Amino acid sequence: LGLTNLSHPKPFPGDILEFPLNKYFSHFGIYYGERDGVPYVAHLTCRDSETKLLLFGRALKSEVKLDPVELVGRKYKVRNLLDKVHPPRDFYSLVKPAIDDMIGRDVTFDILFHNSEHQATLFRYGLKKSTQIEKVYAQILPTWKKPFEKKKL
């Protein structure tokens, strides 16, 4: 099943792909292009058990991997969220060498400060941003604001 058979536009190398996981969170990667006709995505993924991630929101043994798009997920969309405010970096001269350099290196995954969306925006734009975490903050902050002001948190 090639990319063109799926219900989304064919991505270009350097595009951010969003793979929905559930109602609140998605997994993100950078479309890397094809190898032997197989489309690949570069993404930040955890090497150790998911339980650490659920408990602490952190995983020390994470890495940027290059996997076939279908292995990461069959449902995805191109999400170049920041293109209007930040010009994307050139894929072949900047993004691809950065990905190649990061593959297999230990990276600390942190759901708030360095998740797969942060990594994808860092590759594409040269800056870390996570809109899904910003949405979570927007929901949580009003709830925490009063107790925080009253020094109860």
Image (spheres, grey):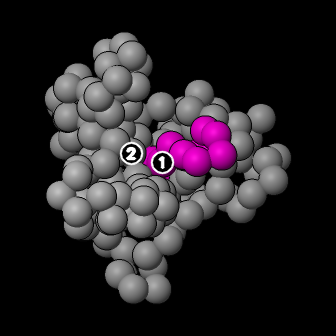
Q: Amino acid at mark 2?
A: Ser
Name the one closer to the observer, 24 or 26: 24
Judging by the rendered image, the residue that carries numbered circle 2 is 116
In which quadrant will I find the N terminus? top right
Quarter of the image holding residue 115? top left
Residue that appears at 21% across and 40% down: 102
Above or below, comparing residue 100 to residue 90 in the picture: above
Name the one closer to the observer, 72 or 117: 117
Most common SS among magenta residues: strand
Above or below, comparing residue 153 to residue 67 in the picture: below
10 Å neighbourhood of mark 2: few (<14), some, or many (≥20)?
Answer: many
Q: Amino acid at mark 1?
A: Phe
**Left or right: 153 in relation to 87:** left
- The secondary element bearing badge 1 is classed as strand
- Residue 95 place in picture, x, y as percent: 30, 59
Residue that appears at 23% across and 23% down: 61
Asked whether the beta carbons under mark 2 and mark 1 sit within 8 Å of each other, the answer is yes
Q: Residue furthest bottom?
A: 84
Q: Which residues are magenta?
A: 19-31
**Magenta-span inclusion, residue 25:** yes
Q: Give the spatial CA distance, label 2 vs label 1.
A: 5 Å
- Residue 20 place in picture, x, y as percent: 62, 45
| Mark before the other along the chain sequence, 2 or 1 | 1
Judging by the rendered image, the residue that carries numbered circle 1 is 28
- Residue 15 place in picture, x, y as percent: 49, 61
**Left or right: 89 in relation to 135:** left
